[in-house]
Image (cartoon, rainbow, N blue to C red):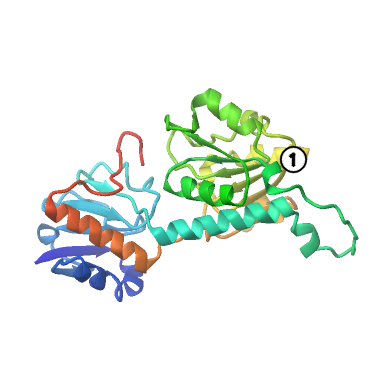
Amino acid sequence: MLTVLFAAPALWPEYEPHLPAALAEAGLTARIVTEAAPAEVDYIVYAPASPLQDFTPYTRTKAVLNLWAGVEKIVGNPTLTQPLCRMVDPGLTEGMVEWVVGHTLRHHLGMDRHIVNPARVWDPTCPPLARERPVTILGMGALGSACAEALRALNFPVTGWSRTEKPGQLHGAQGLRQALSTAQILVTLLPKTPETENLLDADRLALLPRGAVILNPGRGALIDDQALLAALDAGQIGHATLDVFRVEPLPQDHPFWSHPKVTVTPHIAADTRAVTSSRVIAENIQRGEAGEPFLHLVDRARGY
């Protein structure tokens, strides 16, 4: 019998109805525990807030299965020598697509001025069609690709940019300049790595068309906060809808809260769903037991 350590005890009540069922459905016989002797553990289900930080004693463990898409809080742990898999959850992807499409349409249609209109201004100006509103997505992994597909289905012209070369996508420094230059709406879905931190600094914000909108459901550190505030004040950026921040919860005195051109959403763009992510975990354990490659294995050199 396999021993699966669920090393995110605060989340166990959410997973208790689903993970055992997913493992059984995959034909796996396993006991799932929130505490175990390290020498007994075959797999670790993990969240970065876990009290488990020293992986050295877990010599039997075949893989650490992260519950979140982001791995920046664990990938640099020097004691972690076991394979690390990030979470690519269909439920999380679906939630991200809904958030990105919803806020893209909100800004494209100018909905804010109609929803909050205390002066009762009658402005019959119609927005352009979606096909006339270029969108750029930075980060064309599973989430970015799904968002691009949904937006293209609504006729938005979508430009994708990736850090590394991918078919049909812009990449590299020159590609980034090109991707930013047309982005009336910019969506950031990159992981946090040393290369992506402050990727959107003052110089790159200046490359965007004047009045562009930024949607950031990726990572807070992708954008230089002070540069963004300056660009908003100068009118270079028309609005920023931000779901992720360098410090969370966002401190009450942070200027994002009170800025008239910033919308704060409290890291709700996408969440790992216990029902669907349990199936992903079960499939990876099944693959590990069959000697097959793990899904969504993290490249330690790249950091994701």
Which residue sits furthest top?
174
Q: Which residue is mark 1?
A: 211
How many residues crowd mark 1 within 10 Å: few (<14), some (14–19), many (20+)?
some
- In the image: residue 137, left or right of residue 273: right
Q: Position of residue 103 (x, y in %)?
A: 63, 55
Please identify the quadrant where the N terminus is shown: bottom left
Place residue 251 in its image quadrant.
bottom right
Helix, strand or loop at disc 1? loop
Residue 253 visible in this rendered orientation of the protein: no
The residue that appears at 33% across and 47% down in the rendered structure is: 74
- Relative depth, front residue between 241 and 102: 102
Q: Position of residue 155 (x, y in %)?
A: 62, 47
The amino acid beneath tag 1 is Gly
- In the image: residue 232, left or right of residue 301: right
- Relative depth, front residue between 141 and 11: 141
Q: Is residue 284 above or below residue 300?
A: below
Looking at the image, how many numbered discs can be counted on the residues? Answer: 1
Q: Is residue 204 above or below residue 12?
A: above
Q: Position of residue 227 (x, y in %)?
A: 65, 37
Please identify the quadrant where the C terminus is shown: top left
- In the image: residue 210, left or right of residue 93: right
- In the image: residue 18, left or right of residue 108: left
The residue that appears at 76% across and 47% down in the rendered structure is: 128
The residue that appears at 20% across and 46% down in the rendered structure is: 293
- Relative depth, front residue between 289 and 206: 289
Residue 224 visible in this rendered orientation of the protein: yes
Q: Position of residue 64 (x, y in %)?
A: 24, 53
Place residue 23 in its image quadrant.
bottom left
